[in-house]
Image (cartoon, rainbow, N blue to C red):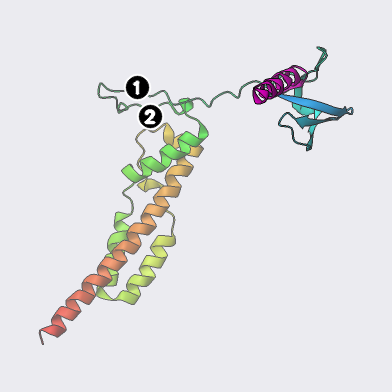
Amino acid sequence: MKSFFLSLFLFLLQVSCSFGQDVITTIRGIAFHAKIESETEQTIRYKKTDNTTAVYSMAKTDIHLIKYENGSQLFLNPVLPEPSPEPKANFPLTASGKPATNAFNRADTLTLKELYTLGKADASIYYKGYKEAGTYTFISSFLFWPAGMVTAISTASTPPKARNFTYPDASLGKNPEYVRGYHGNARKIKSKKVWSNFGAGFGTALGLAILYVSRQ
């Protein structure tokens, strides 16, 4: 019985304390209970309500409102508005839910990040300008691998030519951020294909040489 009354007393004490606390609301709209220890023109010092002895400090520029335990209030700063979401792409869709073929003709409906990402993705689909460099590298590495190595280094380090770029929409080719994403990925694709063809040419020549020697 004594333990029951002790628990009840502690519960009522906790409830009464909660009503005697200050409430701080930040400019982010977050409110929490605290016990304000002291204030200056720039900051407040407070304790949290978890019965710890730690004292915390907060700049008044980060506070929207203080509700004191005596009922008075102090307005300091307005609550910050919610950040506006970035405008999203507004592509027309086909009946299957996929973007229509003319879905990418409005660069102004995309954010800069989306334009850059779209440029990289389109380069993976439409850029085929690496074939000439890849073919030369394959032939030279097949005939004489040191020459193939020189060809691979030269062509892989050379940026793709603009005439080899194919855009799904001409208007996108005029947007700097889209072009930056497209060109950057096209250069990576070209380099990867060139070195892949160097390995294929050298490997083919080596395999034929081993086959020839084994039959002698």
Q: Is residue 162 left or right of residue 130?
A: right
Residue at numbered disc 2: 104
Instruction: Identify the residue at horizontal 77%, vertical 21% (top origin).
Output: 21
* Front-lying residue, 126 or 86: 86
Which stretch did the figure color magenta? 1-30
Question: Whole-percent x and y of residue 55?
Answer: 80, 36
Instruction: Identify the residue at horizontal 35%, vertical 45% (top origin).
Output: 124
* Front-lying residue, 154 or 15: 15
Whether residue 30 is visible, yes or no, is: no
Secondary structure at badge 2 equals loop
Q: Crowding near pointer 2: few (<14 within 10 Å), some, many (20+)?
A: many
Disc marking residue 92: 1
Question: Whole-percent x and y of residue 27?
Answer: 71, 23
Q: Quadrant of the N terminus?
A: top right
Query: Mark 2 and mark 1: span between their CA atoms?
Result: 9 Å
Question: Whole-percent x and y of residue 152?
Answer: 37, 66
64 lies above or below 52:
above
Instruction: Identify the residue at horizontal 73%, vertical 28% (top origin).
Output: 49
